[in-house]
Image (tube, rainbow, N blue to C red):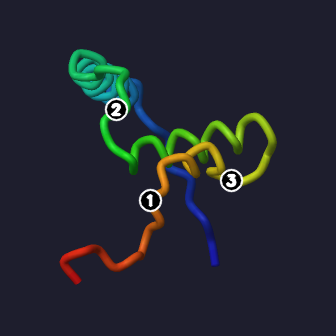
């Protein structure tokens, strides 16, 4: 099996950077920096634990008492 390497032209590279910059600007304009849900808090806690300790752990959210997968009061 022969692999072919496709060189990226400068025009394609600059177009990709422009699209990336535009999408990054749109994201930064709409970013609030707040955690608004328990899912967001859990994602943040897991990422923080991965960066600090190298473990996938979310013990920081145990105080919430929300166990995922429990049956709610409505059945």
For marks 3 and 1 on the same chain, the one whose residue lies earlier in the sequence: 3
Closest to the observer, 54 or 28: 54
Camera-nearest residue between 38 and 46? 38
What percent of the width, then of the height, locates residue 57? 68, 53
Left-right relation of 12 to 64: left
Q: Which residue is tagged 3?
A: 57
Quadrant hosting residue 23: top left
64 to the left or right of 47:
left
Circle 1 sits in a helix, a strand or a loop, which is it? loop
Q: Is residue 31 above or below residue 55?
A: above
Give how far across and how far down residue 44 sits, in percent: 52, 39
Q: Would residue 22 appear left or right of 53 to someone viewing this image?
A: left
Q: Residues within 10 Å of mark 3 (few under 14, many from 20)?
A: some
Q: Looking at the rendered structure, which numbered label has been put on residue 66? A: 1
Which residue does the image show at 32% across and 23% down from the upper left? Answer: 24
Report the number of discs: 3
Q: Residue at 56% x, 60% y: name it.
A: 4
* Quadrant where the image shows the C terminus: bottom left
Query: Looking at the image, which is closer to me, 1 or 45?
Result: 45
Give whichever of 74, 68 is nearer the camera. 74
Find disc 2 in the rendering and name its residue.
12
């Amino acid at each position: 099996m022969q692999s072919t390497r496709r060189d990226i032209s400068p025009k394609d590279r600059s177009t990709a950077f422009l699209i990336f910059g535009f999408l990054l600007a749109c994201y930064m304009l709409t970013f609030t920096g707040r955690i608004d849900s328990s899912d967001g808090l859990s994602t943040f806690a897991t990422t923080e634990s991965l960066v600090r300790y190298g473990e996938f752990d979310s013990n920081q959210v145990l105080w919430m008492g929300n166990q995922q997968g429990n049956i709610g009061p409505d059945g």
